[in-house]
Image (cartoon, rainbow, N blue to C red):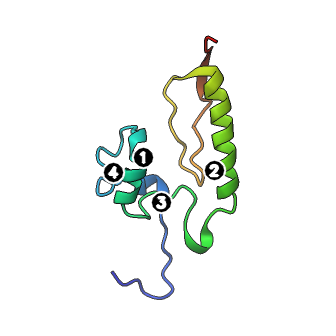
């Protein structure tokens, strides 16, 4: 669809990441959506946690490295369970509306 010159286009990752055209049962938590084969099958712009093109987040590579290290360290030592019902606050980064409770249970060694 042509977009006239000078038009402001706004893309909402929050909504895009919940489109049934790209995501079966879009409101269900399904980590399997990010398995290698599933990622290859879907449209490359169906998931945009860091934007794309000229407006891509400069912290993407740092986040990817840091998040894996932090999660690997925590998950190797604890079983983690979310308590309550965290809901996002609609903003640029979708922070939670309130505090997110976590229950950490040390893993037996």
Q: Are marks 4 and 2 in contact (CB under 8 Å)?
A: no
Q: Are marks 4 and 1 in contact (CB under 8 Å)?
A: no
Q: What is the number of the mark on residue 64?
A: 2
| Whole-percent x, y for residue 17 in the image | 42, 53
In the image, is residue 1 above or below residue 60? below
Q: Nearer the viewer, mark 2 or mark 1?
A: 1
Where on the picture, by quarter, is residue 55? bottom right
**Label 3 vs 2, first from the N-terminus:** 3
**Label 2 vs 1, first from the N-terminus:** 1
**C-alpha separation, residue under disc 3 versus residue under disc 2:** 21 Å
Q: Quadrant of the N terminus?
A: bottom left
Q: Nearer the viewer, mark 4 or mark 2?
A: 2
Q: Give the crowd class for mark 4: few <14, some 14-19, many >=20 residues within 10 Å.
A: some
| Whole-percent x, y for residue 59 in the image | 69, 57
**C-alpha separation, residue under disc 3 versus residue under disc 1:** 23 Å
From the image, tell me which residue sits under label 1: 35
From the image, tell me which residue sits under label 4: 23
| Whole-percent x, y for residue 97 in the image | 57, 37
**Label 4 vs 2, first from the N-terminus:** 4
**C-alpha separation, residue under disc 3 versus residue under disc 4:** 15 Å
**C-alpha separation, residue under disc 4 versus residue under disc 1:** 13 Å
Q: Nearer the viewer, mark 3 or mark 1?
A: 1
| Whole-percent x, y for residue 92 in the image | 59, 55
């Amino acid at each position: 669809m042509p977009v006239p010159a000078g038009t402001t286009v706004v893309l909402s990752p929050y909504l895009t990441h919940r489109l049934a055209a790209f995501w079966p049962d879009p409101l269900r938590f399904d980590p399997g959506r990010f398995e290698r084969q599933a990622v290859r099958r879907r449209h490359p712009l169906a998931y945009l946690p860091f934007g794309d093109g000229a407006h891509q987040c400069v912290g993407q590579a740092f986040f990817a490295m840091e998040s894996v290290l932090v999660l690997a360290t925590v998950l190797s030592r604890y079983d983690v369970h979310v308590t309550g019902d965290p809901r996002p606050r609609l903003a640029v980064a979708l922070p939670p509306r309130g505090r997110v409770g976590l229950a950490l249970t040390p893993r037996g060694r």
